[in-house]
Amino acid sequence: MSITFTKAYSRATVIKTDDGLQDVITSVYCAVYATDDETGIRESIGSVIDLNPPQPSQFIPFEQITVELLDSWIISKDQYIEMESKLVDAVNMKLNPPVVIKELPFV
């Protein structure tokens, strides 16, 4: 089984001014989609993911934030890793449900 994950971002929590930096992102809302490559079964989950405070020397202005940059910031966060794990479990549950409905043998 191979699962492909995709992400979508919709909003961010921003501190207007922090230690002289403008529009500092402190968290983002991320929706994660997991699709089983063989069956097309798809599950999704969304959550706010907290970000590390920026280093002033490495600060990137809000207007220059990209999807790829956000991906690099969240990929190792425990919150994101937990989301992927829950999605794998949800896809597996659909592929191999523990309870099924069966017709009785005499019907």
Image (spheres, helix red, strand yellow):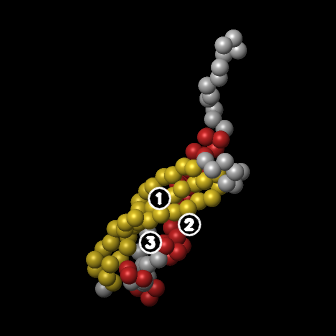
Along the line of sight, which residue is nearer the eye, 6 or 85?
Answer: 6
- The three-letter code of the residue at mark 3 reads Asn
Q: Can you give x and y, in whole percent of width and height, for residue 16 in the image?
A: 28, 77
Query: Which residue is label 1 attached to?
Result: 31
Q: Give the x, y percent position of residue 17.
A: 28, 80
Q: Earlier in the sequence, mark 1 or mark 2?
A: 1
**CA distance for labels 3 and 2:** 11 Å
Q: CA distance from mark 1 to mark 3?
A: 19 Å
Q: Amino acid at mark 2?
A: Ser
Is 1 on the left or on the right of 31, as rendered? right
Gap between marks 1 and 2 measured at Cα: 16 Å
Residue to which mark 2 is pinned: 76
Residue 80 horizontal side relative to residue 37, left or right: left
Q: Amino acid at mark 1?
A: Ala
Helix, strand or loop for disc 3: loop
Residue at left offset 37%, top offset 66%:
11
Front of the two marks 1 and 2? 1
Residue shown at 44%/72% (left/top)?
52
